[in-house]
Amino acid sequence: MPERAGLARERLLKEAVHELGHTFGLRHCSDWRCVMSSSHGIELLDVKGEEFCPACRREVFRLYR
């Protein structure tokens, strides 16, 4: 059980956005703050953000224009 309220929801959101990014054709990102960064452990999941970095955002727009 998460040690603070909302942590499970935050983790679920990040993973859902990450997997949606893969369905858009994105690969793992080297920017550790990007939601598309690879998170092989819960610690990495907790430090990354909930949004695409500027490069990944541009790629999504480029692919789906």
Image (spheres, rainbow, N blue to C red):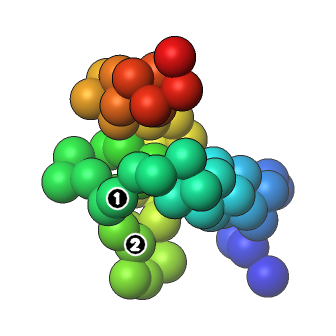
Where is residue 5? Give x, y as percent: 81, 56
Nearer to us in this view, 39 or 60? 60
- Res 53 → quadrant: top left
Image position of 28 (left or right of 13): left
Kind of residue sitting beneath label 1: Arg
Q: Please give the residue where the numbered disc 2 appears in the rendered image.
A: 39
Q: Residue furthest left?
A: 30
Q: Quadrant of the N terminus?
A: bottom right
Which residue is at a point 52% across and 17% down the rendered structure image?
A: 65
Q: 45 above or below 24?
A: below
Image position of 15 (left or right of 57): right
Q: Please give the residue where the numbered disc 1 appears in the rendered image.
A: 27
Q: Residues within 10 Å of mark 2 (few under 14, many from 20)?
A: some
Where is residue 39? Give x, y as percent: 40, 72
Which residue is at a point 46% across and 21% down the rendered structure image?
A: 61
Kind of residue sitting beneath label 2: Ser
Where is residue 37? Give x, y as percent: 34, 58
Where is residue 43? Give x, y as percent: 41, 73
Q: Residue furthest top?
A: 65
Q: 13 above or below 39?
A: above
Q: 14 above or below 51?
A: below
Q: Residues within 10 Å of mark 1 (few under 14, many from 20)?
A: some
Check if mark 2's residue and mark 1's residue have beta carbons within 8 Å: no
Specify which label sits upstream in the sequence, 2 or 1. 1
